[in-house]
Image (cartoon, helix red, strand yellow):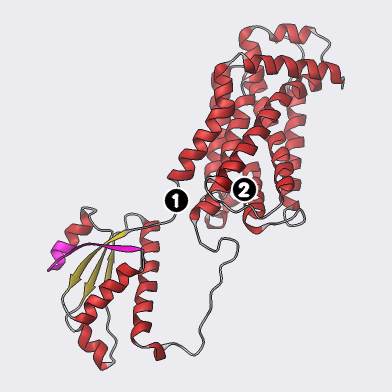
């Protein structure tokens, strides 16, 4: 491979990007816009759960229970009702996400030492919110029970300690995965236009007639977008750490090295798409379908791969975003070193080599 010819192709591509405001916007503005939008919009944390109260007991003990629920910080009172039909309307119309029903003999049961059941009615139209609401309510009720009778605690008391994301903030595991999704889309989308643009503008014939070899052409076109992708990665990590306050416990150097491996594979994948389709519109559409959707749905970014059907779990191994999401979360939250992520890093490298080879084999220096 001739380095001078490769550098000449890279310079040509840099100039072309500079003269194209759309490419510049895609390269530098779109990643940050997506990071801001998705970073703030996607959250698994639930705050201020509106709770409607149906207190049939109306005693100091029932009021203490309601106060204990709201004091937990997760619940706020949406209103008090006098019957079940009113409670149903509150939940049905979305005024409240849950309803707390306190039976008439609640205080009497507590004072006599008998079990004092209460009913929690939860809107299950959003399964995730319903599950979290039940968990919060159970914890608040457990705290209330133990405040009344500390001696009722079991002999064996588990002491839970959360590692890696102690505050259990969903943003801490969403944002690192989000970086992988955004870089996947931008990298493949930008390079998917490279060869297709040459065909559409009629300049591919000139490139074919030059002594530039295929590997030099592919590498030269890849270099400018690799630099852009690396800059985008730096910006994304800086936003994650300094704006979203996501802890970065691992090595920054290792993180950027893994980003380089990931970028190499995705950029070559975009070039391969551009070579195959030879037209910018279908190439850009194909790059979005083959990068954004798998990265968003099949990488473990939000949906756990272990919870997917077995057939889909095997399909996820095809997409490099799966490995990069694991790497990002491991370095950000766990502070993992290279030995812990070696398998995922190796598979990313294999993907890059395969698509680079495929792109070089697919492009023929001749007019069809």
Q: What stretch is highlighted in magenta?
A: 74-87
Q: Say left or right for 242 vs 220.
A: left
Q: Image quadrant for the C terminus?
A: top right
Report the residue that reaches farthest toward the right: 2
Helix, strand or loop for disc 1: loop
Quarter of the image where one finds residue 360 = top right
Marked residue nearer the N-terminal end (1 or 2): 1
Residue 255, label in figure: none
Where does residue 197 sit, x and y in percent of width and height?
62, 15
Helix, strand or loop for disc 2: helix
Sort mark 2 into few (<14), some (14-19) or many (20+) by Cα contacts within 10 Å: many
Where does residue 317 sit, x and y in percent of width and height?
65, 47
Residue 325, label in figure: 2
Quarter of the image where one finds residue 181 = top right
Name above or below for residue 8 compared with residue 323: above
Residue 166 on the magenta span: no
- For marks 1 and 2, give the CA distance: 17 Å
Where does residue 299 sit, x and y in percent of width and height?
58, 47
Q: Nearer the viewer, residue 20 or 311?
A: 20
Comparing labels 1 and 2, the label whose residue is closer to the camera: 1
Q: Image quadrant for the N terminus?
A: top right
Q: Say left or right for 59 vs 12.
A: left
Name above or below for residue 154 compared with residue 181: below
Q: Can residue 112 be seen in this view?
A: yes
Residue 43, label in figure: 1
Residue 84 on the magenta span: yes
């Amino acid at each position: 491979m001739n380095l001078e010819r490769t550098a000449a192709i890279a310079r040509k591509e840099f100039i072309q990007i500079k003269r194209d405001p759309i490419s510049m916007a895609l390269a530098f503005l779109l990643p940050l816009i997506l990071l801001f939008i998705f970073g703030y919009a996607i959250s698994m944390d639930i705050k201020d759960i509106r709770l409607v109260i149906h207190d049939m007991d109306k005693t100091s003990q029932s009021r203490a229970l309601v106060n204990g629920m709201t004091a937990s910080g997760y619940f706020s009172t949406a209103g008090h009702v006098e019957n079940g039909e009113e409670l149903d309307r509150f939940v049905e119309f979305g005024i409240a996400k849950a309803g707390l029903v306190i039976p008439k003999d609640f205080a009497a049961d507590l004072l006599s030492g008998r079990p004092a059941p209460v009913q929690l009615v939860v809107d299950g139209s959003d399964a995730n919110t319903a599950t979290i609401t039940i968990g919060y309510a159970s914890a608040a009720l457990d705290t209330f029970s133990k405040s009344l009778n500390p001696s009722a605690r079991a002999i064996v008391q588990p002491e839970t300690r959360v590692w890696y994301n102690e505050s259990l903030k969903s943003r801490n595991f969403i944002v690192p995965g989000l970086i992988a999704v955004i870089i996947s889309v931008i990298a493949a989308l930008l390079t998917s236009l490279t060869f297709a643009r040459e065909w559409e503008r009629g300049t591919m014939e000139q490139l074919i007639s030059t002594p530039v070899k295929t590997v030099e052409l592919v590498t030269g076109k890849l270099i400018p977008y690799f630099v852009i992708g690396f800059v985008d990665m730096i910006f994304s990590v800086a936003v994650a750490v300094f704006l979203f306050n996501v802890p970065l416990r691992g090595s920054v150097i290792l993180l950027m090295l893994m980003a380089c491996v990931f970028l190499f594979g995705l950029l070559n994948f975009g070039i391969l798409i551009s070579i195959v389709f030879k037209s910018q519109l279908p190439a850009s559409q194909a790059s979005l379908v083959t990068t954004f959707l798998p990265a968003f749905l099949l990488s473990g970014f939000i949906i756990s791969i272990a919870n997917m059907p077995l057939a889909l779990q095997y399909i996820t191994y095809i997409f490099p975003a799966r490995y990069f999401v694991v790497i990002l979360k491991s370095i950000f939250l766990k502070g993992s070193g290279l030995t812990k992520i070696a398998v995922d890093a190796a598979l990313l490298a294999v993907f890059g080599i395969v698509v680079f080879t495929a792109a070089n084999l697919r492009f023929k220096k001749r007019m069809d």
